[in-house]
Amino acid sequence: MFNFMDPDFLARRCVWVNGPVIVGAGPSGLAVGACLKEQGIPFVILEKTDCIASLWQKRTYDRLKLHLPKQFCQLPKFPFPDHYPEYPNKKQFIDYLESYATHFDINPQFNECVQSAKYDEACRLWRVKTVSTNGSARSDVEYFCQWLVVATGENAERMVPDIDGLKEFGGEVLHACDYKSGEKFRGKKVLVVGCGNSGMEVSLDLCNHEAQPSMVVRSSVHVLPREICGRPTFELAMFMLKWLPLWLVDKLLLVLAWFILGNIEKYGLKRPSLGPLQLKNTKGKTPVLDIGALEKIRSGEINVVPGIRRFACGMVELVDGEMLNIDAVVLATGYSSNVPYWLQEAEFFSRDGFPKSPFPNGWKGKDGLYAVGFTRRGLSGASADATKIAQDIGKVWKEDLKQKKQKVPTHRRCISQF
Ligand SMILES: Cc1cc2nc3c(=O)[nH]c(=O)nc-3n(C[C@H](O)[C@H](O)[C@H](O)COP(=O)(O)OP(=O)(O)OC[C@H]3O[C@@H](n4cnc5c(N)ncnc54)[C@H](O)[C@@H]3O)c2cc1C
Ligand SMILES: NC(=O)C1=CN([C@@H]2O[C@H](COP(=O)(O)OP(=O)(O)OC[C@H]3O[C@@H](n4cnc5c(N)ncnc54)[C@H](OP(=O)(O)O)[C@@H]3O)[C@@H](O)[C@H]2O)C=CC1
Ligand SMILES: O=C(O)C(=O)Cc1c[nH]c2ccccc12
């Protein structure tokens, strides 16, 4: 069970956690924490950065707002303030998450990156190893716990495509997660690779700062208006789904989109053969909710171009043979899960770092393993997972308490040095 001679084991501080270990202090981890607090269950949240919601605080652009109306983005048991607008901006969302953590008295352990986690059959506990990420002299830790909640998110790592010649390009190349504003690209020709919500919004932001973006659309994309007849499209879709099958809702959305946006294929925005919600559900590809990029595409201020063949010094060659002179490249090429890098488990999670079982069964594995925020349903999916996970852990917790017939003090942590 324990190898007392293993130098790695000897170098680590060992901590027994009475309750679950939650990996990640984003909205998902906080939501699980809040639901556990409500039941008086202690837990530890391990967060590799120095703040909560690091995706929102450190890896998003300035002009970002929630795309879905606020009622679909709030976390369990603590609504957004009434005065918040329908689509809160990035600062308002972060402020909300900060007050969420304060309200539930959630204090994650910052600067601790989970390096590996595996279930130890012999001691029937999860063993979670972390390394300190702030360079402090504090030693690395191994946590032992009965439950492990994976809350590292669908957007943990940037996806960087390996495109021929990119290294020889010479100009600035950045991923959308490092893009803040178009200010520094004023007057520059910028190639934006990708046409998801990030690619569209980065292109729009570049236009607003007098840069000249060309946006790569290599395959297809669903663009929907954010509102239909003054009501949020997402709300309308959720309403229709109560009565109608998904394929029909998709057809109706596309008819409405056609009336409002017209034929967008003539601008190079080919629609996928699957409908927008079906595509989101089966492939995880989010439809673009338009907040102004389409108008810039129509006016020619955003130049839509086909796929990339290769880069050369200061240039890009497209698949149709056209050569463009460009000053910078923004890779709005998406994200991936990082679970396969650290979770040593192959039954519940697949190799792409998402649970194998599709929604609504992807939240619970074996041996006390849980996943929150991997349903490809944004923040509302994460909230639903969090509620179920905390209830499930709560049942066992209460059963254990009954059996022990004694009250377990909260946060009893035996910090033992072997
Ligand atoms: C630009 C952008 C805009 C979005 N807008 C919306 C929206 O409007 N509405 C919506 O519903 N969804 C939106 N989403 C989806 C997004 O997934 C959610 O908003 C939300 O951030 C998901 O929360 P999460 O906690 O699951 O993941 P994250 O917010 O990514 O949090 C995961 C946390 O885990 C930490 N972590 C990762 N690996 C480790 C490790 N090994 N050890 C310790 N800590 C680790 C990270 O540092 C991070 O803090 C958006 C996504 C992006 C990229
Ligand atoms: N305000 C909001 O709510 C916002 C929400 N988001 C969310 O964040 C998540 C991530 O979005 P996003 O960052 O846009 O990522 P996505 O995964 O949605 O989109 C990635 C894009 O990059 C393209 N791409 C990938 N590799 C290449 C390549 N080698 N050459 C050309 N194109 C390539 C993809 O094309 P293909 O389809 O052909 O693979 C796709 O268009 C989504 O869920 C999104 O909704 C993002 C921004 C704002
Ligand atoms: O932004 C995301 O990643 C989400 O999952 C939320 C979301 C934005 N637009 C959508 C359209 C359909 C389903 C979910 C979303």
Image (cartoon, grey):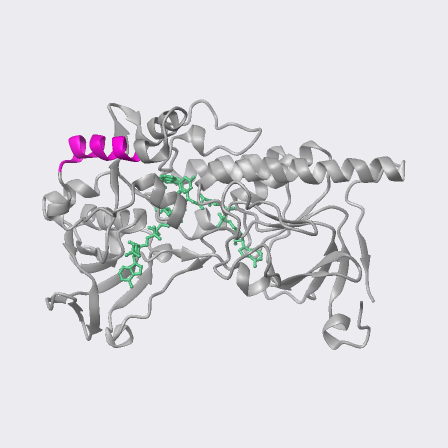
**Residue 407 image point, x, y percent:** 86, 36
Task: State how many labels appear.
Answer: 0
Tell me if residue 35 comes above or below residue 319 in the rendering.
above
Region rendered in magenta: 250-262
In the displayed structure image, the side of residue 287 where residue 80 appears, left or right: right
Q: Is residue 315 above or below residue 343?
A: below
Whether 255 is among the magenta residues is yes
The percent position of residue 61, horizontal first and vertical second, equals: 35, 49
* 91 relative to 123 in the view: left or right: left
**Residue 133 seen from this side:** no
Residue 190, picture quadrant: bottom left
Q: Residue at x 36, y 34 (%)?
A: 246
Percent x, y of residue 141 = 70, 62
> Looking at the picture, does residue 163 appear above or below residue 29?
below
The relative height of residue 5 versus residue 301 in the rendered view (above or below) is below
Residue at left offset 54%, top offset 59%? 339
Q: Quadrant of the N terminus?
A: bottom right
Asked where in the image residue 163 lies, by quadrant, the reply is bottom left
Residue 12 position within the rendered picture, expressed as x and y whole percent measured from the top left? 73, 67
Q: Could you tell me which quadrant the C terminus lies in?
A: bottom right
